[in-house]
Structures are given as C-alpha cells and as structure tokens.
Amino acid sequence: MIELLGLPYSPWTEKARWALDVRKVPYRYRTFQPLVGEPALRLKTRRFRGNVTVPVLTDDRGAVYADSADIARFADTLGDGPTLFPKEHEAAIAHFIEVGERALAAGRVLSLHRTLDDDAALTELVPRGLRGVLGRLAPRLGELGVRRTLRKYGAGARAIEQHRADARAALDELRAALATSTSTPKTVLGAFTFADIAAAQMLSFVSPPAFGIKLGKASRRGFTDPELAKDYADLVAWRDALYEAHRPR
C-alpha cells in the first residue's frame, strides 16, 4: 500500500493529497509527529543533514518521494482522472509551482507571527493528550514549536513587510493569470492541472479553505490574514469554486 506521511494542517501536504485524491490513487495517510518523528523521517529520506519535512510518500516498491510536486507527478502516472502535468504545459506548471512556493513561504512566516500572539492557537499546536497535563504551560510549549519553525526556515532574516510584499507579488501574478481564463471555474492554464492545485494553496495563509486542510478554530485565526483576505477576496472566491469543482472530499 502506498503511504503518505504528512501534517493535516499543512498546505504542502494538501497539495500532495489533492493530487492523489483527484487521480483516485489509493493510499494510506499517516500523520507526522514533529520532533519525535524526525529521526525516522531522516532515515526514510536518507537526509541526515539540513531540514527535513513532509509530505513524504513511499510507494509499494519502497521508493520515496519527498516533495509535494514529485508526489503529484507520481500520482499522475497512476489511477484515473485529469492529467495534472500535460507535456505542453510543463514549463508553465513548473513556474506556478515556484510562484506558489514563494507565496507559501511568505505566508507561513506571517501566519506563525500571528500565532505567537494567540495563546489558544499555540495550545492547539500541542498534542491533545498533553494539553490537560500541561495546563497553562501548553501555550508555552506551542510557542517553542513556532519559534523553532521560524528558525528552521530562516524567517528572522527578513522583515515582516518584505514577506507581505512577497505574498502580494505572487498573488498579483495569479490574479493576472486568471484574468484571461474562460473556463468555469477559471483555471490557470485553460484546463485543470497541478498549476491550479499549487496556485490554490497560495491562499491557505490568506483565508484557509473550508475543507482539505484541517484546522482548529484558533489555528484558523492564525492562518487568516484579514488584510490580504480583503484585498484578494476575488482569489479566495476563485479558490473556493475550484475546491468545489475539483477537490474530492
């Protein structure tokens, strides 16, 4: 059985799951446990230095795919459903994967800083079984995890406003790409491809989707950027329509 290791609240995991689901590829999903699960993840991916992260897929032959786009390409070779990587659009899809990654990297930093100011959101980051035991210390443990993530991705090297500018630049590019679309719902390249999956996740740290990504009430506040959600309400509406049309529940 194909196994996907991921995080239920991660847009990167959602990209992989969406690709597998829309291609009707059967798989077993397993939630990654940060910190305690890292040694096993390093062993699985053979990455013994630097950052390791999920999603990670292991196929039925033992091959490992450690990137959401690579997992989606793997899904495109199996199952049935829309072709996610049509050859004539390979370069354009690769471009929107890169644009999406820039938007997600910026959005993650902004989201983590919002979460630092919300004890309820910090508490939701702590495993449910530990929250009652830790009591008032639970949000402090969550805070340690958030600060570790910020250090992991070098988030302290740039000003918050620069990250916001990066997010806006990516969202503006998506808006321009959709402006010429005539499909219903609109698609980045005229037909549904992985470019749309990657582009849709750009909105996860603006206003998270109603399904797919799993978030507690407080965590959803941390993922939501009121300023960007207002300024890019048209893109949020587009993402929601795309989910309804193409995201299997």
Image (cartoon, grey):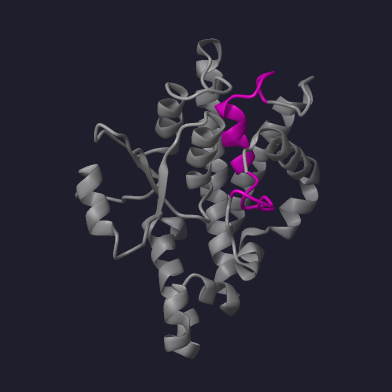
The residue nearer to you, when weighing 94 against 71, is: 71
Q: Is residue 68 left or right of residue 122?
A: left
The residue nearer to you, when weighing 63 against 99, is: 63
Q: Position of residue 61 (x, y in %)?
A: 25, 31
Residue 80 is at least partly visible in this image: yes
Figure check: 101 above or below 83: below
The residue nearer to you, when weighing 238 against 4, is: 4
Q: Position of residue 203 (x, y in %)?
A: 65, 46
- Quarter of the image for the N terminus: give it: top left
Q: How many marks?
A: 0
Q: Residue at (31%, 50%) from the top-left corner? A: 52
Q: Residue at (65%, 50%) from the top-left corner? A: 211
Q: Position of residue 29 (x, y in %)?
A: 42, 48
Does residue 84 show up magenta in the picture?
no
Does residue 189 show up magenta in the picture?
yes
Q: Position of residue 84 (x, y in %)?
A: 54, 23
Q: Residue at (69%, 58%) from the top-left corner? A: 225
- Main SS of the magenta part reads loop
The residue nearer to you, when weighing 224 against 4, is: 4
Q: Residue at (63%, 51%) from the top-left corner? A: 164
Figure check: 104 above or below 173: below
Q: Is residue 118 left or right of residue 27?
A: right
Residue 49 is at least partly visible in this image: no
- Quarter of the image for the C terminus: give it: top right
Per the rendered image, the range of residues in magenta is 188-212
Q: Is residue 67 left or right of residue 162?
A: left
Figure check: 128 above or below 92: below
